[in-house]
Amino acid sequence: MLLSIKDLAVEVDGKIILNGLSLDIKSGEVHAVMGPNGAGKSTLSYVLAGKPGYEVVSGSAELDGVDILSLEPEERAALGLFLAYQYPVEIPGVNMTTFLKVAVNALRKARGQDELNSLDMLKLIKKKQQSLGISDDMLKRSVNTGFSGGEKKRNEVFQMAMLEPKLAIMDETDSGLDIDALKAVSDGVNALRAEDRSFLIITHYQRLLDYIKPDIVHVLSGGKIVRTGGPELALELENKGYAEFIEDAA
Amino acid sequence: MSRIDANTIETVKSLEKYEAGFVTDIESEKAPKGLNEDIVRFISAKKNEPEWMLEYRLKAFRHWLTMPEPDWSKVNFPKIDYQDAYYYAAPKMTDRPNSLDEVDPKLLETYEKLGIPLREQEMLAGVAVDAVFDSVSVATTFKDKLKKEGIIFCSISDAIADYPDLVKKYMGSVVPYHDNKHACLNSAVFTDGSFVYIPEGVRCPMELSTYFRINELNTGQFERTLIIADKGSYVSYLEGCTAPMRDERQLHAAVVELITHDDAEIKYSTVQNWFPGDENGKGGIYNFVTKRGLCEGKNSKISWTQVETGSAVTWKYPSCVLKGENSQGEFYSVAITNNYQQADTGTKMIHIGKNTRSRIIAKGISAGNSDSTYRGQVKILPGAENARNFTQCDSLLIGNNCGAHTVPYIECKNPGANLEHEATTSKISDDQLFYCQQRGISEEDALALIVNGFCRDVMQHLPMEFAVEAQKLVGISLEGSVG
């Protein structure tokens, strides 16, 4: 099992958001977590990545058999966890190339690999950049600063390609994207699908799953997984909406 | 709950982080403690100075007694007891050494430990160094090579002896002895410093550099730097400073004067890393410095770049007097304060000549309980037709207990002038730090990365060799400001 979450309860500002959530993801699988607004979808992604302010009340989460909930965010990243943000953060003054260099080498160092020199780093960037259609101009600009919504999301996928995670969590990647951008981002993700890489795709709409085909679909409501099924579950939700699950959870 | 807020004050281990904080155990010769006319005479006599120099010192000292302490800056510190310090300390040497082989190996070791090798064969290519230890210059490298170009690079003491006409003509011409209390004290008791003269049409082939080190306890350091760029010449000069860690406050009051003639350019860079005091604000250097450049000739240019990370209290305004037509002044500054440091720093751009231009980029970073103020004056005199100034002041706050202030003074007496002022204040957010950490970058490294990004516009004006060092220093000086 790559990711194993058991009975996870999480509090934010004194309020229980996740309440007994369990979820298992095998290596190479693509899981989708769908759910209504306020179900705890983003909380799930943040607590796994280690964002401060998300208090674990009980339960556990293991990545590759390692309990990650007590680790620093960068240690979780070193274990292979990557979070593609719903709203990527702007860092003025730090250009993308520098940011990637520092991040890639920090991860390599933590994983006991040699750091890449500038030339090798540039080669790696070029290679990944071409396959994702990232312009040279974007690499010169400050991290996410002045990027359009579509550029920001593509940039997240680009970082994912550079950092080669074992588990990529995608938090509402489809929000705010037009159909062309959605397709471009999905193509990027599909190209990264591999036997040793799993995805946890968090989304409100079925639309994204037309492009990134999940193996398993979960419904998150009221802070826990209330139903699990195959790709057909997403279509059912698209037709019926989340109403019955909201009632169930309540 | 923000991590920054919770832990800013509890910076730990910062005592171990100031890597230059060691003391060299070397025998030294000191003047008696205290300050009076006899001490001034003692210093002058120690240096075998001519009568005119002693007269200048005494004139300054008598005037100093009548001057009030400047009280307009936004810094707070206990009144300085001028009688409770030594004004002259020199490592014991029989004579001024003629070559590095005659320099006490302990001194050479000190500089090596600081990463400043004085042995010429070990030097970074293209950097000549003058090393000032407490009150005296201990070694100046590459002197002979420079001499072939007609360039004079020596200690100010040597210059007074060997080039009295140049010193007499220029010393005090930009910063008169009565300019302000600290400059006046310096004029009376200055002990050493560097002197540079670049002859007409010469482009100095290497970076010139002075390295200041305070070693002795309770000793003030009062260095004096004078750089003259004759017509059509160019020089890039760098100054670095460190001191051991001590509980007592130490005074450093320097004066730097720059003069550019027609078509000449001086680029002056400072990386200031005096001991900032410990995490509770104990000890540290009072850094009260008067730096001013005069663009005397037409088309001349003076550019100040400073990275200020050290000192308990900084009071410093490197300025340009733009007298020559078409002359240009630049000021690029990064000032970082952490723990209980206070910095009141900025510049003055005085436009006198026609078509004079100035550019100010000031970046202030405050962390811990520190306080940082940008104070800058742009003055356009009636004769300065078509004068232009652009000012940009950006402040970055880390945590909730620090302060950043911007105090611009703009005075314009010519209606044809064009002045621009931009200012921003921002805060490093927990979201930015977390974003970096999610990508595998540790919190401290993320902070250094973000702050260096914020300072980039200034850092790129530093000479290449020192930019890397300065970037590291940014990271080190902010260590412990998040937890």
Image (cartoon, rainbow, N blue to C red):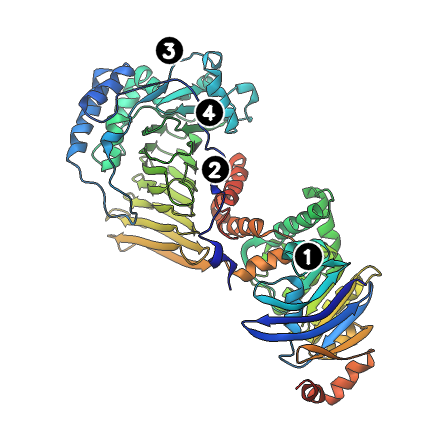
Q: Chain of mark 3?
A: B
How far apart are the two marked residues, 2 and 3, measured between alpha carbons? 33 Å
Q: Which residue is mark 4?
A: B129
How far apart are the two marked residues, 1 and 4, measured between alpha carbons? 47 Å
Q: Secondary structure at mark 1?
A: helix
Q: Secondary structure at mark 2?
A: loop
> Residue furthest toward the right?
A195
At label 2, counting other C-alpha atoms closer than 10 Å, the crowd grade (few under 14, some 14-19, many 20 or more) is: many
Residue flagged by tag 4: what amino acid is it?
Val
Q: Same chain, marks 2 and 3?
A: yes
**Vertical relation: B254 (above or below) B159:** below
Asked if marks 1 and 3 touch (Cβ < 8 Å), the reply is no
Q: Name the mark nearer the viewer: 1 or 4.
A: 1
Q: Secondary structure at mark 4?
A: strand
Instruction: From the viewer's perspective, tell me whether residue B101 is left or right of residue B282.
Output: right
- Asked whether A116 or A30 is in front, the reply is A30
Q: Chain of mark 1?
A: A
How far apart are the two marked residues, 2 and 1, measured between alpha carbons? 31 Å
Q: Which residue is mark 2?
A: B18
- Asked whether B457 or B412 is in front, the reply is B457
- Asked whether B230 or B172 is in front, the reply is B172
Image location of residue A75, percent across then percent down: 67, 54
Q: Secondary structure at mark 3?
A: loop
At label 1, counting other C-alpha atoms closer than 10 Å, the crowd grade (few under 14, some 14-19, many 20 or more) is: many
At label 3, counting other C-alpha atoms closer than 10 Å, the crowd grade (few under 14, some 14-19, many 20 or more) is: few
Q: Which residue is mark 1?
A: A76
Q: Which residue is mark 3?
A: B95
